[in-house]
Structures are given as C-alpha cells and as structure tokens.
Amino acid sequence: MNWTPIILTFKLAFFTTLILVIIGIPLANWLANTKYKIKPVIEAIISMPLVLPPTVLGFYFLLTFSPSGSIGKILNDLFDIQLVFSFSGLVLASVIYSLPFMIHPIQSGLSSIPSSLKEASYLMGKSKTTTLFRVLLPNIKKSLITGIVLSFAHTIGEFGVVLMIGGNIPGETKVASIAVYDEVEALNYAGANMYSLILLSISFVVLLTVYLINGGYLKRFWE
C-alpha cells in the first residue's frame, strides 16, 4: 500500500486548518459583533460550500485560477505562481470550502457570551484584541475545538473540489479520497478498502474526540 496519499491528506488538512484558525477567529468575531447590513450577505457567501455541490465550486476555482483565467493569469505572469494542479491550489480551495465549518461554531460561541463580559474587559483598559484572545476565546473552548476538529475532518474527506482544482498528480495532489477513486476504477477493491478503512477510522476518532471533550466525558474520566 502506498502511504503517500494518506500523508498528503494529513498535510493538506493541517495547513488548511491552521490557515482557517488564523483567518476564522477574527472573521467569526466580526460576524458575532457587527451591526452592518451587509452581514447576511457575508454569512451567505461563507455558508455556500454547505449547499453548493463541490464540483461546482471546484469548477469555478479552475476557471478563476487557471493560467488563462483573470486572477490565474496575473499570478502566473507577475509572480510565477500556478495554483491549478498544485498543492498550494489545494490548500486555497480547501480553506474556502471548509470555511463555514470553522466560522459557524466560533461565531455561535462568541454570540452566546454576555456583553457584560466584554464591557468589563474594556473598562479595565483591555484592547479589543486582548479581550478577544484573553477573555472571550478561553470562554468558548468547546466551540473553538469543534471548529478546528470539524475543519480538519472535513478537509480529510474532500473529493470533488480537490479533484477539480488539483487533478490526480502522485505525490503532489493525489490525496486519499482520490486514491480510493483510482483504486475502484482499477477494480482494485482491496486497495480501495484499505484507504477507505483508514479514512473511516480517522474520521470516527476525530469526531468522537469532539463529542467526548464537549460532553465533559474526558474530564470526568480523569477525575
């Protein structure tokens, strides 16, 4: 069995989740507190991957970032960057595709915090950034963990988007979900079963960990 697709899948999930944490926390905080009328539009855009077929999203990524596309041509001509059929392109597509899985839990957690907690922090002279990271986020650990784990797990299971934007390049864009598809096409059901069992086990363990942490079972176990 070739372990490269599994390793590449974890690599993709790690970098995608890391980027989502960096951009997701401030964006979720803005959505939880903003009063701008444009908020529903931003929320709709962020949530589109939840209802949009992955192949549709991948198709528009392909058009936008291909060397003949508007943005893709600029990146290629000015910076010699090609996102289509590359690992970098996979990461970008995965970040956008998994964005709601990071944003929604954190936004929901921040929205549930009493405003008096933030006001008390401001009265003590704390900045908005300090308040967010030292006061608010520690109070929504479960929401934060949920967002991180769901984003990681969702990236592991991607197929349509990664196939459209990344293709099937061994060692570069051929992740585990693509490997399963290849093995089935080759009628190698034993190989497809091995990849599928690994992905199934990983997904189960990841999701079980979320429910154990959020349900307080691990804390009660150690007590």
Image (cartoon, rainbow, N blue to C red):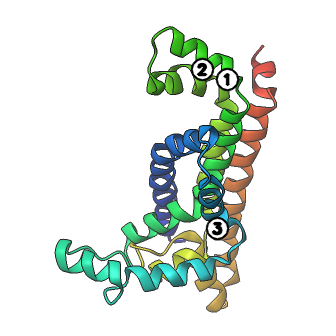
Residue 49 is labelled as: 3
Residue 167 is labelled as: none
Residue 58 rendering spot, x and y as whole percentages: 54, 79
Residue 24 rendering spot, x and y as whole percentages: 53, 46
- Give the quarter of the figure containing the C terminus: top right
Comes first in the chain, label 3 or label 1: 3
Residue identifier under label 2:
118
Comes first in the chain, label 3 or label 2: 3
Q: Amino acid at mark 3?
A: Pro
Depth check, front residue: 25 or 173: 25
**Callout 2–callout 1 Cβ contact below 8 Å:** yes
Q: CA distance from mark 3 to mark 1?
A: 31 Å
| Numbered marks: total | 3
Is 76 located above or below residue 45 in the figure? below
Residue identifier under label 1:
115
Provide the secondary structure element on which disc 1 rests: helix
